[in-house]
C-alpha cells in the first residue's frame, strides 16, 4: 500500500497538513466515508477545509465519490493505478442495516453501448443488501 506522501506526490498534489490528515484517515477505513463521518473522526479540522480537500482529491483522481442511495455522498480512496476514467469504475455495496458503503474493486462496471451522440461521463452501480457483520 502506498503512503500518503507517495500518493500526493504521484498525483502532483501539494502535501498540506489537512490533506495529509484527511487522506490518512480515508486510507485507514474499510468503507467509504461521508463528509460527516470524516468531520466526526477529525474533530480538530475545519469542515470547509475537509470539503475543499475532498474536492481537490476528486479532481486529481485520489478519491472517488459514491452515491449509494442513502442520500449522502461518500468518499473512498481510488485503487492504485486508477485515474477515475470510465474503465476504472466499479460496483459498490450498500448495507441497508449499518448504512456503510463498500467498494467492490474486483467487479468493474461494464461498457454500455449508448445511442448515437450520447456520451457517458460517469456511472454508479450499487448493490444493496446486508454486509457480513449485519447478515
Image: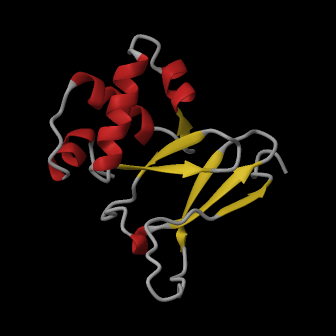
Q: In this view, does 2 lie to the left or right of 79?
A: left
**Quadrant of the rendered structure where residue 26 is?**
top left
Spot occupied by residue 60 in the image (x, y as percentages of width and height): 26, 50
Spot occupied by residue 30 in the image (x, y as percentages of width and height): 55, 44
Spot occupied by residue 92 in the image (x, y as percentages of width and height): 61, 59
Image point 34% across, 22% down: which residue?
Answer: 49
In this view, the residue in front, 96 or 56, is: 56
Image point 18% across, 42% down: which residue?
Answer: 13
In the picture shown, does residue 74 fall above or below 16?
Answer: below
In this view, the residue in front, 126 or 43, is: 126
In the picture shown, does residue 97 fall above or below 135?
Answer: above
In this view, the residue in front, 29 or 54, is: 54
Instruction: Name the residue furthest top.
Output: 44
Image point 57% across, 44% down: which residue?
Answer: 31
Q: Is residue 68 left or right of residue 128?
A: left
Spot occupied by residue 125 in the image (x, y as percentages of width and height): 62, 65
Instruction: Name the residue furthest right.
Output: 135
Amino acid at each position: 500500500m502506498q503512503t500518503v506522501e507517495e500518493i500526493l506526490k504521484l498525483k502532483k498534489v501539494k502535501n498540506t497538513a489537512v490533506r495529509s490528515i484527511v487522506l490518512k484517515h480515508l486510507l485507514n477505513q474499510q468503507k467509504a466515508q461521508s463528509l460527516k463521518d470524516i468531520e466526526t473522526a477529525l474533530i480538530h479540522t475545519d469542515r470547509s477545509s475537509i470539503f475543499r480537500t475532498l474536492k481537490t482529491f476528486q479532481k486529481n483522481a485520489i478519491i472517488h465519490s459514491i452515491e449509494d442511495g442513502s442520500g449522502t455522498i461518500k468518499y473512498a480512496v481510488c485503487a492504485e493505478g486508477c485515474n477515475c476514467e470510465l474503465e476504472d469504475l466499479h460496483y459498490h455495496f450498500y448495507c441497508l442495516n449499518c448504512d456503510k458503503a463498500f467498494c467492490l474493486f474486483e467487479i468493474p462496471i461494464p461498457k454500455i453501448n449508448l445511442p448515437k451522440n450520447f456520451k457517458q461521463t460517469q456511472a454508479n452501480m450499487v448493490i444493496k443488501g446486508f454486509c457480513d457483520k449485519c447478515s
